[in-house]
């Protein structure tokens, strides 16, 4: 064994020291300033916490299809859904235009998510909220809205052409709030006495009253279906975020439509950035949008031609699917559409929970069905983005309830993705 020389060790140590020093002081060395994390400025209240949600790879679907399937985690917004974006845009534009004043009441007809978002953000603008909701919506949605301090009016589902459709009732409530506020102002001017402000209405055969704040500044109907602030929320927010988060490297976008704001705002923004990005609709049972996109005619398989049912075909996917064209949906730029079924949405939700730990609501699950359909259509090697609208937390009594699903023949049985033809 050769003896170890002290001189050799010293020379080696010196060489290593010189190399380390050269690295530390070279132009390629990491700047010490980078080692200190830049202090992030706190977001300004609840409103600033909305948006900029993560875009995640849905591993199980990506691996199964050979595409990169990415989900925009809108369930991480403060109000728990993509509708938070719509709520702040509608309220801010109304305040700027003078149609709504601080101290006013925002009214809306909603199956749940938009109502929850409006009830969440309205107090941040100094406003109250009154929601009219169909009584077949999951009961926990009403409970959440009431817990947020809003007034909830549950009504029976009827056609949009009926004066007592939940959207039409919400529109009336705003007018009634304006009338009550006007009477209050006149009374103040005449005798300086404040009047108790209430709106009386009958629901479910029972007379109820909506108590307005003493100094209520009137009402404003949010009108999420026709108000283009909905479209602008996604054209100015969600679409640009997806573009930035993917670095513009995406091939397709797919989502379902209820009001149509999300699919319209995102599709229009992405196709303006790159016309080669394909945008698709995934449509649930009972909705006429699939045929509108693919054939140019609003018509559903569940309805006989010329014999429209008064009530929409029952589906477990709340908040998506519609039998009329909204102002928001008409802004969409779509390349095609796919149909989805209730059972596919249920199976997808269980598959994602088991394989990815994603606990998603019905519309989110349907969007993921759409993402797989797009992947099967355009082939492997592509990047596809969809929206994870909300979590399963507000779907416990129906979509996530085994007994309810069993009663409607929707008990999930799949092991993998065989319900979409993938084995």
Image (cartoon, grey):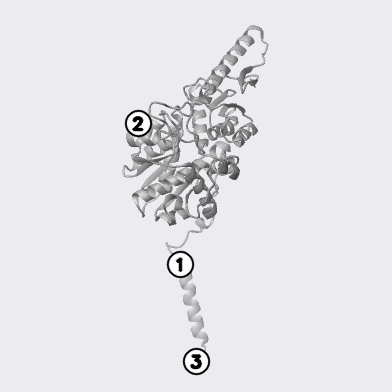
Of the numbered discs 1 and 2, the one sitting upstream in the chain is: 1
Residue shown at 42%/31% (left/top)? Answer: 303
Q: In the figure, 305 relative to 411: above or below? A: above
Considering the numbered disc 3 on the image, is that residue within a helix, a strand or a loop? Answer: loop
Q: Report which residue position mark 2 lands on.
A: 297
The answer to whether mark 3 and mark 2 are in CB contact below 8 A is no
Considering the numbered disc 1 on the image, is that residue within a helix, a strand or a loop? Answer: helix
Q: CA distance from mark 3 to mark 1?
A: 33 Å
Quarter occupied by residue 381: bottom left
Q: Report which residue position mark 1 lands on.
A: 23
Residue shown at 46%/42% (left/top)? Answer: 341
Residue shown at 59%/35% (left/top)? Answer: 141
Q: Residues within 10 Å of mark 3 (few under 14, many from 20)?
A: few
The answer to whether mark 1 and mark 2 are in CB contact below 8 A is no
Q: Residue furthest bottom?
A: 1
Q: Which mark is residue 2?
A: 3
Residue 127 visible, this angle? no
Q: Residue furthest top?
A: 190
Considering the numbered disc 2 on the image, is that residue within a helix, a strand or a loop? Answer: loop
Residue 207 vs residue 74, the one in the foreground:
207
Residue 127 vs residue 280, the one in the foreground:
280
Q: Residues within 10 Å of mark 1 (few under 14, many from 20)?
A: few
Q: Residues within 10 Å of mark 2 (few under 14, many from 20)?
A: few
Residue 56 visible, this angle? yes
What percent of the width, then of the height, locates residue 357?
55, 52
Q: Residue furthest left?
A: 276
Q: In the figure, 398 relative to 132: above or below? A: below
What percent of the width, then of the height, locates residue 347?
50, 48
Residue 250 relative to residue 124: left or right: left
Q: CA distance from mark 3 to mark 2?
A: 91 Å
Q: Nearer the viewer, mark 3 or mark 1?
A: 3
């Amino acid at each position: 064994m050769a003896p170890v020389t002290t001189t050799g060790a010293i020379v080696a140590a010196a060489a290593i020291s010189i190399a380390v020093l050269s690295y530390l002081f070279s132009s390629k060395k990491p700047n010490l300033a980078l080692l200190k994390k830049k202090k992030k400025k706190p977001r300004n209240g609840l409103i600033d916490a909305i948006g900029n949600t993560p875009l995640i790879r849905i591993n199980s679907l990506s691996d199964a299809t050979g595409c990169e399937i990415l989900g925009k985690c809108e369930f991480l917004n403060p109000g728990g859904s993509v509708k938070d974006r719509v709520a702040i845009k509608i309220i801010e534009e109304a305040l700027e235009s003078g149609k709504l004043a601080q101290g006013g009441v925002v009214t809306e007809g909603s199956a749940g998510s938009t109502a929850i978002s409006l009830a969440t953000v309205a107090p941040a603008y100094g406003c109250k909220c009154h929601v009219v909701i169909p009584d077949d919506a999951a009961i926990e949605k009403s409970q959440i809205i009431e817990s947020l301090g809003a007034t909830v009016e549950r009504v029976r589902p009827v056609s949009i052409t009926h004066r007592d459709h939940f959207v039409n009732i919400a529109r009336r409530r705003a007018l009634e709030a304006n009338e009550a506020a006007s009477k209050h102002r006149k009374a103040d001017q005449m005798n300086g006495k404040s009047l108790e402000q209430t709106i009386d209405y009958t629901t479910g055969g029972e007379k109820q009253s909506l108590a307005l704040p003493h100094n209520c500044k009137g009402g404003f109907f949010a009108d999420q279906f026709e108000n283009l602030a909905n479209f602008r929320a996604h054209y100015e927010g969600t679409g640009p975020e997806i573009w930035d988060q993917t670095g513009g490297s995406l091939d397709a976008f797919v989502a379902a439509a209820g009001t149509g704001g999300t699919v319209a705002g995102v599709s229009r923004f992405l196709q303006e950035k790159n016309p080669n990005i394909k945008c698709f609709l995934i449509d649930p049972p009972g909705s006429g949008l699939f045929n509108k996109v693919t054939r140019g005619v609003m018509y559903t398989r569940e309805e006989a031609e010329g014999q429209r049912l008064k009530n929409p075909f029952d589906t477990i996917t709340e908040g998506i699917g519609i039998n009329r064209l909204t102002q928001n949906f008409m802004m969409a730029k779509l390349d095609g559409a796919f149909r989805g079924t209730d059972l596919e949405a249920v199976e997808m939700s269980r598959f994602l929970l088991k394989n990815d730990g994603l606990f998603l609501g019905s519309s989110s699950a349907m969007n993921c069905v759409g993402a797989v359909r797009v992947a099967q259509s355009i082939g492997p090697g592509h990047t596809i983005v969809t929206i994870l609208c909300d979590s399963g937390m507000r779907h416990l009594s129906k979509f996530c309830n085994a007994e309810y699903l069993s009663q409607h023949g929707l008990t999930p049985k799949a092991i993998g993705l065989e319900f979409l033809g993938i084995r």
